[in-house]
Image (cartoon, rainbow, N blue to C red):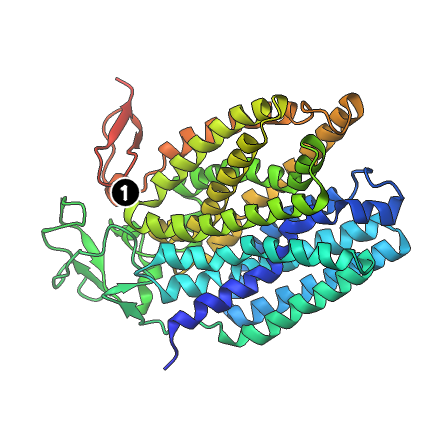
Amino acid sequence: RFSRWLLLPAAFIIQMTTGSVYAWSGYNVAVDTAISGDPVAGQAPIAFYIAIAFLGPCAALFGPWLEHVGPRSGALVGGLLYFVANMTAALACHFRVIWLLYVGYGMIGGMGLGITYISPVGPLQKWFPDWRGLASGFSIAGFGLGSLTASFAQNSLLSTFSVEQTFIILGTCYFGATLLLVSILRVPASNYSVGGVTFDTIRGTENLSYQSSTLYPHSHYKTLGPTSTQNGASASYHSISNEPALVDAPAKNPLKLFYAINLVDALSSWEFGLMFIMLFSNILLGLTTLSKLQDMVKFQFGRPPAHASLINAIAAICSTCGRILIPSISDKTGRKAVYMFSLALQIAICVLLPIAFDMEMYPAFLACVFTLQVVYGAGFGAIPAFLSDLFGSRNVGPLHGVILCAWSIAGCVGIAYNNILNEEVLALGRASPFIYNKNLHWILPVDCVGLAVTLLIRSNIRDRVMPRERGEFARFRVRARQPCFVLALS
């Protein structure tokens, strides 16, 4: 009698607790002042980048364990680690020890973030095989909205309490909310399906029909008779029945990619590698901008701290809307088109932001930032559904954990971004409109590469399984139902 719709708000709120890390920029001045006595020391932002750097590897490392023990244990362990991280951050500020902040909030907090982040993702993809984009968006959206609530809570508490007490109060609240909701998380039975679509189904194979087999008389496999795929192409291949041994398909089976394949094959595929580069490119600009957003508002445009917190909160709402709405729309438009649109917009924003800083065009700056947060959130929200479309939902937890290493790499790159920014601040001054230009100049080509790579992802099932033409080295299409372009050497 369990209703799968209960998972959506539970996952949303659990993600909100860990999404508070996105409001870290509100701690920067208070933490630097508490530890070094210098409010512009620039040491506090490194804790944020370390946490993001640890998030991906821990999500990848604990992904298979999470599939074994279930989402409840994962969310509980992750929430506990994040609670310990907040307590350690309080101790670091009290004893004025910067390395304790990096170890506690950065490393331990990053581990907790990684485990908690992926805990609701797999269950929602399995419970909603018919609405993968919607489930993907909800399982990620709370992480973005957590910045909204945490931003106001931090400013309110910091005006009354010390930074150490603020860490203790908020850390306890976050862990308490996780304890209340963790019992709702669960996975469906192995034979669960909605409208004939199971969590093993790969996008594009929903309408394939089955006939009896003579080719594999002693196995699970059946022969697929001449039929039409969802995209109108006729096919006659070997298919796999809906029995538990799907993941043990032999290498000879020509329809091995038609159903959930094993984790190693998925990780070693061409598509997964391209998706990794795509996600990294989609993350980089939004992550680095978000970490400095309140500083930009305060120093480059001269707004008060309360106004900067408001802008940070609105950006969080934009990110949350992007995580829910755009992945839901991608159920109709396709995931690849979403990422191409996102990266194209980010290229334009990279060009426009230096102009907005230089000419002090505050409305243009806000338009760029809010648009950036929408597509930044959309990239996170759509990636679990994209993985399920190409590889099935059986191993989406581990796959999602591994691909989040792109987020961690972006966090490591963010440390270099912070160092370049500090050098620019020393040379030009904190309020200079040009201190972000150098970083934006090298992020621009990264987004261009990401757009080109996204175009080469073979999201259509026919492009992945049909034989290559002579001399062919790449094939691509913008959307699944549009013509396929083939690149070949004559």
Asked which quadrant contains residue 452, the reply is: top left
Residue 67 can be seen in this image: no
Asked which quadrant contains residue 355, the reply is: top right
Asked which quadrant contains residue 58, the reply is: bottom right
Q: Is residue 368 above or below residue 66?
A: above
Residue positioned most to the top? 490
- In depth, the one of 66 and 293 nearer the eye is 293
Residue depicted at 57% across the width and 60% down the height: 16
Residue depicted at 65% across the width and 72% down the height: 176
Under mark 1, the amino acid is: Asn
Q: Where's residue 94, x and y in %?
A: 88, 57
Total residue callouts = 1
Q: Is residue 278 above or below residue 239?
A: above
Q: Is residue 408 above or below residue 142?
A: above
Name the residue that disc number 1 marks.
Answer: 460
Q: Where's residue 161, x and y in %?
A: 81, 60
Left or right of residue 285: residue 159: right
Residue 489 can be seen in this image: yes
* Quadrant, the C terminus: top left
* Quadrant, the N terminus: bottom left
* Element under disc 1: loop
- In depth, the one of 335 and 460 nearer the eye is 335
Dot 1 alpha-carbon crowd within 10 angstroms: few under 14, some 14 to 19, many 20 or more: many
- In depth, the one of 476 and 180 nearer the eye is 180
Residue depicted at 81% across the width and 37% down the height: 40
Residue depicted at 71% across the width and 29% down the height: 421
Left or right of residue 13: residue 267: left
Q: Where's residue 303, x and y in %?
A: 69, 38
Q: Where's residue 482, x and y in %?
A: 22, 36
Residue positioned most to the bottom? 1
